[in-house]
Image (spheres, rainbow, N blue to C red):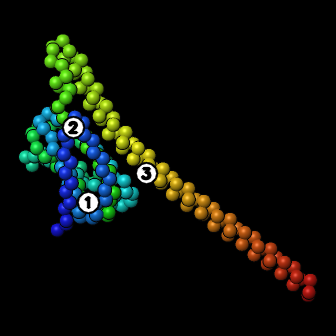
Amino acid sequence: MTLARTICIVSLTYLAVAGLQFKLSPHEELCFHEIAHRGNKVLAFFDVLSWGYGAYAYLVVTSPTGRELKRFDAQSEGKVDFYAEDDGEYNFCFKNHQSETEISFSVNLETDYGLSEVAKEEHVEDMQDSVDHLHSIVSAAKVDLSEFRLRESQHRHLAKSNKRRVVTWAIVECVLVFFVAVGQVVRIRKFFEQKMTV
């Protein structure tokens, strides 16, 4: 049986964004819990940062009643988007069956506290709906932007690593070509010196 670790993220502000990066060992389960109230919009995004065979994650999202909301099997990335139907703790449980995997995970919770109580008059309902919609779009864009930054950082690291390898190999090739050239000159010299003595 594997050891399960649990991290609780409690959201009390109007907009809570939690971005995490963690390593998941083989056959390990790691659960994150987000407390939401009925009507809250929950956005979550995960991305596997590791490369190679077995660099996948299994994610199961469950409601406070234990009902499975979403499942990802052997995926390298995924996005979860839903409105909370019940008050309570929503679980995001990651599993890994192959090799150690590094994962980035972010949760964005929009609570119903704030914008719904800005204006009560009927003549501003359309404007309130537009503001709520724009807020939802901006929140999703904020989550996507943080993921793009993380990917850009990962790709920059990979490019620097590849550049270092190419430069190292080029230096090794230059050294080898130099020694081959010196060896050929010495060999040809000996060949002509032997001809002259005969």
Q: Secondary structure at mark 3?
A: helix
Q: What residue is rendered at 33% in x and 37% in y? A: 142
Q: Locate the N terminus by quadrant.
A: bottom left
Marks 2 and 3, the one that precedes in the sequence = 2
Q: What residue is rendered at 26% in x and 31% in y? A: 136
Tell me the residue that label 3 is attached to. 154
What type is the residue that disc 1 sits on? Asn
Vertical side of 35 occupied by 190: above or below: below
Return the x and y of residue 92 as percentages of the image width and height. Answer: 20, 50
Q: CA distance from mark 1 to mark 2?
A: 32 Å
Q: Residues within 10 Å of mark 3 (few under 14, many from 20)?
A: few
Q: CA distance from mark 1 to mark 3?
A: 21 Å
Q: Secondary structure at mark 1?
A: loop
| View extreme (left): residue | 65
What type is the residue that disc 3 sits on? Gln
Tell me the residue that label 2 is attached to. 13
What type is the residue that disc 2 sits on? Thr
Q: Secondary structure at mark 2?
A: loop
Return the x and y of residue 96 as percentages of the image width and height. Answer: 26, 60
Report whether residue 102 is seen. yes
Pick whichever, 17 or 42, lies toward us: 17
Return the x and y of residue 152 as percentages of the image width and height. Answer: 44, 46
Q: What residue is rendered at 26% in x and 23% in y? A: 131
Pick whichever, 7 or 165, lies toward us: 7
Asked whether the residues under the numbered discs 1 and 2 touch, taking CB atoms below 8 Å apart as contact, a structural biologist would say: no
Q: Residues within 10 Å of mark 2 (few under 14, many from 20)?
A: few
Q: Locate the C terminus by quadrant.
A: bottom right
- Of badges 1 and 3, nearer the viewer stands 3
Tell me which corner region of the image, top left, top right, bottom left or bottom right, holds residue 100. Answer: bottom left
Q: What residue is rendered at 20% in x and 42% in y? A: 11
Tell me the residue that label 1 is attached to. 96
